[in-house]
Image: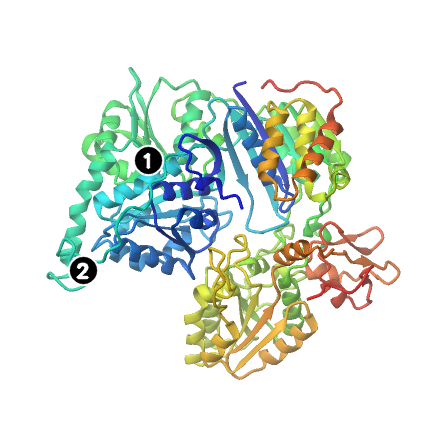
Amino acid sequence: MREFNLVIAGVGGQGSILSSHIVGDAAIRDGYRVRVAETYGAAMRGGAVMGQIRIGTDVQEPLIPEDSANALVALEPLEGLRRGVRYINPSGLIILNTHRLSPIDVNLGRASYPSLDKIAQQLKQLCKEVTTIDGTAIAEKAGSSRTLNVVMIGALRGSGVLPISEQSLRAAIRERVPPGTQDTNLKAFELGIEAMSKPIVNTRSR
Amino acid sequence: MTSHVVARDEPGLRVLLMGNEAIARGAIEGGAKVAASYPGTPASEIMETLSAAARDLGFYAEWSVNEKVAFEVAAGAALSNVRSFCSMKNAGLNWCMDMLTTIVYGGVRAGMVIVVADDPGARTSSNEQDQRFAASWAEIPCLEPSDQQEAKDMVRDAFEISERTELPVIVRSVARISHSLGDVTLGKISPPSKKVVFDKHWKLPFRWNVYGPPSTHSRHVWLHTRLPIAKRLSEQSPYNVLKLRNGAEMGIIASGVGAAYVTEALRWLGLENKVNFLKIGVSHPLPERKVAKLLQRSNRILVVEDGDPFVENQVRIIAKDVAPKLKIQGKARANTLLEPYGELDADMVTLAVAKFADTKWKTVATSRKKLKDDASSLVIPRSSAFCAGCPHIGTYWALRMALHRVGGKVPVIHGDMGCYEMAGYGVFAKSLEPSYSSESVKYPVDSPYEMLDSLYIMGAGIGLAQGTYHAGYTDGKVIAVAGDSTFFHACLPGLVNAVYNKAKLTFVIMDNHWTAMTGHQPHPGTGVTALGEPTKEGNIEDICKSFGVEYVRVVDAYNPREVQNTLVEALQQPSVSVVISRGECAQIWQRTKKKQGTPIVPLKVDLEKCNGCKLCVQMGCPAITFEPRTNKAGIDSLLCTACGLCAAVCPFRAFYQPEGEPRPQ
């Protein structure tokens, strides 16, 4: 594998950045060179957040070129749409969590949130596969809604496209999640894998 | 407690580090014994990392009250023969300019390294300024890492360069280095070995800017004896790498993260062996001979750098002598291939290199572009918002109500830097029209996010408010708002001035007990140091009173009625009035509750009582939702912190706590 590019999109506070650190950490354990870029605004919570992970033998710079993400994991559907439009490769896979977080723009009546079907349908036009899962419910089942980010990494691993070993992912989760939450997060990871472990088309090649 | 990975003395270990962590590790490997900083995105994690490792490794680290003091703490250590380090965001260095441009006249005794994290794209800054110019202005060396490994190594080596030149050295990071992660191989940790001494006559005559020979001017002459040393070091530096290719006609010069983009762009375009490439790691002073060699071997030049055309302009000066007719492209002058604003990215650089080299680069097919446009049309903005349960939500609500009562026709609120600055970001999805009125204009506001009337830099609000008052503004009340950390950082002289010069204004201090926006660092009002030691807790109300402010009141940010009534009183005072609206940051509050094992029970909406008036929505809490079809408010139970603010403002008492009392304070 020369290069695997992953975008993790979400809303501030959902753990998109931590999950991109986990994937990057695991990739290093598997011997790859890694670049992880974080994009967020000034707000502590609630803004549009994106982690970009580039894994390969010779990656140099941290930003993924347009249409070059092999996979996109969205912790929130609108954020999946926002980033998918720019980054997903035609052969790529998108996994969308279905739980919506309404921007205040919607609450104030200044914008309307597109329907989940419409989001998935538009993204499907741009790539090979779009899968939706109720990651938030799975996270609650694992013990805490805060493990959503790890559920989604599990789902990505379960889909078969992420070229990183489960063992390294588990080790990175153990190392990087807050102390005392390791067990819940590892359970979230397993449930995420389970949720996606139906056979799907391999989208690894660029 | 496990120590931070950067404290591990395991040379050769390969780990994933954030740029800021790598920078901290560089300071540790370089043997810094004193480190100081003030939080500021994208630089904050540098000191967070250092303070986490300081105890284990036995060096000193502090959060200073502001960057100027941090700079001086580091400088004082360097004069005392101790390697020292300070870090800050782009704007932070502006506070240090007086000392920076003066300390260079006497130099330093031990290595002093300043890391400044610029923010091209200004995602988390008030401007895009390029602080490499500070290095050329102060006439000191400037290094620019292209990735996390270099960030670590350059900081380590910068101490050596500082001691060889006897000058402070700037390492200029950018957000894409500081806030990106990469694989880094750790090096040896050199223990701080130098003896702490102070010697006023050390290598006379030009020391510590005190007496002795003739004039300030002669110390400037001394500074210029440093330049040849710096130039030699730049020429020999392993961070300035010249790769000349046989038969290549084009030349590219790229500095910092720009070099990483160019390296991959050349590979994607298949141009690796067709272009002469000079990677710049020391951007001030430039390695002139390496640059000249490249210019002489190339028939055209492209310069790639993040920020302003800083390297490019220096290259143009060198070209005047060695290759005056050479075509140089970049960000300066006509025919630019890159813009002198915004942040570089992979697509932008690849396209620029392709154009420069007259090579084809894939573009998005028209059919796909159409599909993308269709999808894009569905995307809606996501405005910046306060966290659910933020104390500022309560304070701004009360301020809005108080101004409604006694604010006059067009009250003016000057803002400041901190979480509460989001009151000046606006609602992204709302379109605005320019005004050409010759009168003061009041604009309708239906959220806290549109309340501020100006928003510049640390401490500006209190000064601007005085200007508005002394200009004779009578169309409404004049208000300044600032947070607790900003109060200590930059508001003290402004407030003293307001009292001294008899301004009439209301200063609202939103005290959440932490430097919250940058990640909850402690400050002089928090009662704890960077190393986690308890310390004196600065008392804002006592400070204000000691300045001569006659009206100082402290209110509970979660009691909007109390805040409102106090503000109404404050706004009618005949002189400066201060209202301190206090409420601990909701995130810290939640963490504390979690540690204590106290469950947070989200509020609920009684749909019978809710009449859809949307007052709660206008309060601006992101946990409050609204369903237009049913015309009812709702609560996102995953976000709600049970602060009770919505219950306090709802005229129909529609919000209730299913179990127990509202948020216990």
Q: What residue is disc 2 on?
A: B200
Q: Quadrant of the C terminus of chain A?
A: top right
- Image coordinates of residue B220 in percent, x first then y, are 17, 54
Q: Is residue B331 left or right of residue B420?
A: left
Q: Residue at x 23, y 25 (%)?
A: B296
Residue at left offset 40%, top offset 39%: B306
Q: Secondary structure at mark 1?
A: loop
Q: Is residue B274 left or right of residue B217?
A: right
Report the chain holding disc 2: B
Q: How is the image coloured?
A: rainbow
Q: Which of B262 and A182 lies nearest the eye of the viewer?
A: A182
How many marks are shown on the rendered structure?
2
Asked which quadrant contains residue B314, the reply is top left
Q: Is residue A135 above or below residue A104?
A: above
Point out the residue furthest to the top here.
B247
Query: Seen from this angle, which residue lies furthest right?
Result: B608
Residue at x 30% of width, y 42% of height: B158
Q: Nearer the viewer, residue B240 or B380?
A: B240
Indicate the chain on which mark 1 is placed.
B
| Furthest residue in direction left, as rendered | B214
Task: Kindly identify the amino acid type of the residue bearing the numbered disc 1.
Answer: Gly
Q: Amino acid at mark 2?
A: Lys
Residue B428 vertical placement versus B362 (above, below): below
Asked which secondary structure carries label 2, the reply is loop
Q: Which label sits on residue B281?
A: 1
Distance, label 2 to label 1, CA atoms, is 35 Å
Quarter of the image where one finds residue B98:
bottom left
Q: Is residue B272 left or right of residue B539?
A: left
